[in-house]
Image: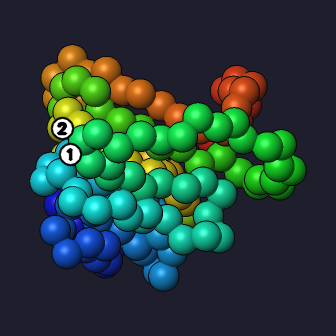
């Protein structure tokens, strides 16, 4: 449910991906569990400090074994991706001035890439989240609570 003047745009024709923007700045990319994608698609542009997308493979195909070469990257800030593995919750999205901009319900299988601004969560059911972010986490001094 959008609040104030948040702009929500569907990033895919299926409507399963929503980009939430405020004042020209992307706050998050919300990827719904269904419908399943039919082709590989990445949702983040190349200038983000993470990559988020679905890679689709047909049955019987293979991903050749590989390793990743060391690459030096400079990252400022902390972006995170959360996947709701179980349960339901509301995600509240805030702009840089800590004003509530939008609220969205998330259910099992949904994922969100938090790109800028602030965020909070209200849990509707017992919930299990899978969290991915640059680490290691150094403690509460990394967060501004408001």
The label on residue 107 is 2
SS category of the residue bearing label 2: strand
> Which residue of the protein is positioned furthest toward the front in this rendering?
60
**Badge 2: residue crowd in 10 Å (few <14, some 14–19, many ≥20):** many
Q: Which residue is mark 1?
A: 33
Q: Is residue 32 above or below residue 14?
A: above
> Which residue of the protein is positioned furthest toward the left in this rendering?
35
Viewer-nearest residue: 118 or 36? 36
Left or right of 13: which side holds 50? right
Q: Position of residue 92 (x, y in %)?
A: 33, 49
- Is residue 71 visible in the rendered image? The answer is yes
SS category of the residue bearing label 1: loop
Mark nearer the N terminus (2 vs 1): 1
Residue at 26% x, 48% y: name it.
58
In contact (CB < 8 Å): disc 2 and disc 1: yes
Q: Position of residue 91 (x, y in %)?
A: 31, 45
- Is residue 122 visible in the rendered image? The answer is no
Q: Give the Cα distance between marks 2 and 1.
A: 8 Å
């Amino acid at each position: 449910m959008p609040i104030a003047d948040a702009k929500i745009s569907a990033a895919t024709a299926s409507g399963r991906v929503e980009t939430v923007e405020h004042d020209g700045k992307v706050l998050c990319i919300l990827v719904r569990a269904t419908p399943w994608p039919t082709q590989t698609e990445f949702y983040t542009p190349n200038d983000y400090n993470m990559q988020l997308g679905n890679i689709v493979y047909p049955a019987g195909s293979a991903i050749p074994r590989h390793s990743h070469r060391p690459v030096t990257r400079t990252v400022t800030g902390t972006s995170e991706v959360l996947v709701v593995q179980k349960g339901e919750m509301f995600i509240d999205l805030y702009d840089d001035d800590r004003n509530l901009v939008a609220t969205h319900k998330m259910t099992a299988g949904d994922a969100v890439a938090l790109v800028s601004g602030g965020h909070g969560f209200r849990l509707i059911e017992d919930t299990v989240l899978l969290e991915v972010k640059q680490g290691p986490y150094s403690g509460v001094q990394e967060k501004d609570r408001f």
